Image (cartoon, grey):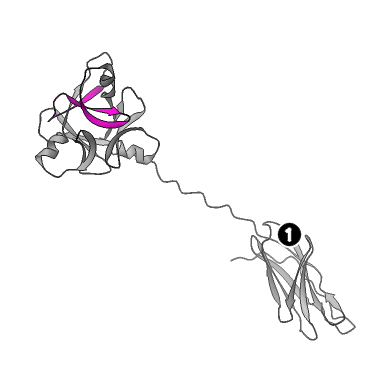
Amino acid sequence: MVLAPLLLFGARPAATDGVEAPVNVVAFANAPAAITVAWTHSGEGVYYFVLEQQSPFAFTQMDAAKRAWTVVSLQASTTYRYRVCAVYDTNRVCSDYAGVTTMRAEAPPAPTVPPAYVPPPGSVSFESNNYRGRFIRHRNFLGELTPVVSDLDRADTTFFVRPGLSGTPQSVSLESVNYRGHYLRHQNFRIKLNENDGSELFRKDASFVMREYDSVEKGWWYFESVNFPNHYIRHQNFELWLARTDRSQLFLLDSLFGQRRH
C-alpha cells in the first residue's frame, strides 16, 4: 500500500520544568477512512498520552507505552490535524499539530453484466396470433405462453425444428435449445417438455404436422397432432394443451402461431 505523503512534523523541545513533550509527530493516511499518528517520547514520568483531533474536536486517551494510534471512521478526501499530549502528575505538554488528508475513496467496480443470450443459428420461436409478444415456451417442463422479458425466457421459447420423430411426412418435432434431446410432446393432452425415451409413443406424441393458415396474412401455422388427428396445440389460460378443434373463431386464434427465426 502506498502511503500518503507526510504533511507536517511537529516537535517541541523538552520543557524547562522537567516535563517532556512528544516529538517527531507524524500523521499519515492508510485508508480512505483511517489515519495513523505516531510520535517519539522517552516515557519518563508520563502517566498517559492523549491524542487530540482539532476539528471536529475529538480525543483518545492511551497508556504510556503507546507510540502510535490509528483513528478510524473518518471521511475520505478530508484533511485532519492531530497533536499528542503527554500527561504528568501536575502538568501536561503537547506537540504541534500534524495534518494529513485521508485517501480518496475508490469507486466500487462496475457490476459485471453477463452477455445477453443469443439463440443458436437455425433456431426459431413461435408467437401467438391473438396474444402478440407471447411465445410458446417450456417452464418447469410444461408448455406455456408467456412474454419474453429475460434471457431465460428467450432460451425457453427457442426451439430447433426437426423432422418429425415419428417419420410422418411433413411432420416436425420441436427440440429445446437449452435442454437438448428434450422435445415438446402431448401427454394426457397437456403439452410438456420431455426427454426422448426412444419409444414409439414418444415419437408420435412429439410429432406435429405444421399446417399453414390459408388467409391473406401468411406465415401463421397450426400444429396438428400426428396420433390425434384434428387435435391441435392451443393455449388456454396461457397453458398449452392438445385439443380437438371445435371450429370456433376463438379456437382458430388460440391455435395459430407465427414462426420467428433467429
Answer with left or right where residue 45 lies relative to residue 217. right
Q: Nearer the viewer, residue 68 or 231?
A: 231
Q: Amino acid at mark 1?
A: Thr
Image location (x, y in percent) of residue 63 = 73, 79
Q: Is residue 72 visible?
A: yes
Identify the residue at horizontal 27%, vertical 38% (top origin): 142
Q: Find disc 1 in the rendering and name its residue.
A: 79
Q: Quadrant of residue 165?
A: top left
Question: Which quarter shows the N terminus?
Answer: bottom right
Residue nearest the viewer, comparing 66 with 6: 66
Helix, strand or loop for disc 1: strand
Q: Is residue 221 magenta?
A: yes
Q: Is 86 covered by the magenta stretch?
A: no
Seen from this angle, which residue lies furthest right?
A: 17
User: The C terminus appears in which quarter of the rendering?
Assistant: top left
Q: Is residue 36 above or below residue 67?
A: above
In the displayed structure, would residue 31 be above or below residue 251? below
Looking at the rendering, the stretch of residues picked out in magenta corresponds to 215-243
